Amino acid sequence: MKEIATDDRQSAILLIDGQCLLCSAITRFVVQRDRNKRFRFASLQSKAGKRYLLESQLPVDDFYTFVMIKDGRTYTKSNAALRVFRQLNGLWPLLYLLILTPAAIRDRVYDGIAVHRYRWFGKSDTCLLPTAEERDRFVKDGILAPEKEEAQDEK
């Protein structure tokens, strides 16, 4: 996998379905509980998302999976989700204990939710729009810029 430009705080990139309302809610959930800003986000459908998928040797048209890229390694589905919980503030890291459940079982549950998520939670024609405070957490065109540079660009 190619090196991706990051700032010192950044440790993981989460790729989400930008049109899924459940995925948008999960993104907001993570942002609110990630006080140390360990996670950055990109839509699977975006230019950046497709680039990360290609670099991770994953299909660029599979929007049924959640992807976490950390330290040059790629995690998907329940493995990705549990690794995210492990790094959140509060009691959420306790959910990481579910990693002891065989991946085949965890991913079967994950796939069941993924297949029905549009029907259960809805779908948007547009991707999640981050607030001004969240904007530095989202990858733009596959480049993670340090917060200072982004702030200067906005002036």
Image (cartoon, grey):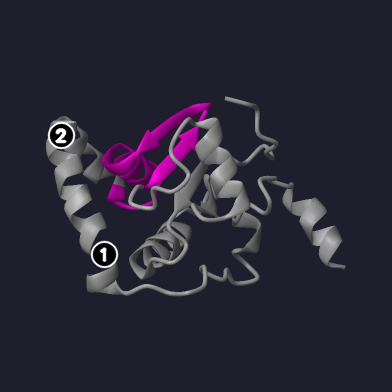
Residue type at numbered disc 1: Arg
- Place of residue 143 in the rendered image (x, y in percent of width and height, measured from the top left): 70, 45
Q: Is residue 74 magenta?
A: yes
Q: Residues within 10 Å of mark 2 (few under 14, many from 20)?
A: few
| Residue to which mark 2 is pinned | 104
Left or right, residue 26 beside residue 130: left
Residue 48 drawn at (x, y percent) = 61, 48
Position of the C terminus, as image quadrant, is bottom right
For the residues marked 2 and 1, what is the alpha-carbon distance in whole angstroms? 20 Å
| Numbered disc 1: secondary structure | helix
Q: Secondary structure at mark 2?
A: helix
Residue on which disc 1 sits: 117
Q: The magenta stretch spans which residues? A: 66-92
Residue 146 among magenta residues: no
At 15% from the left and 34% from the top, the residue drawn is 104
Residue visible at 30% across and 37% down in the picture? 79
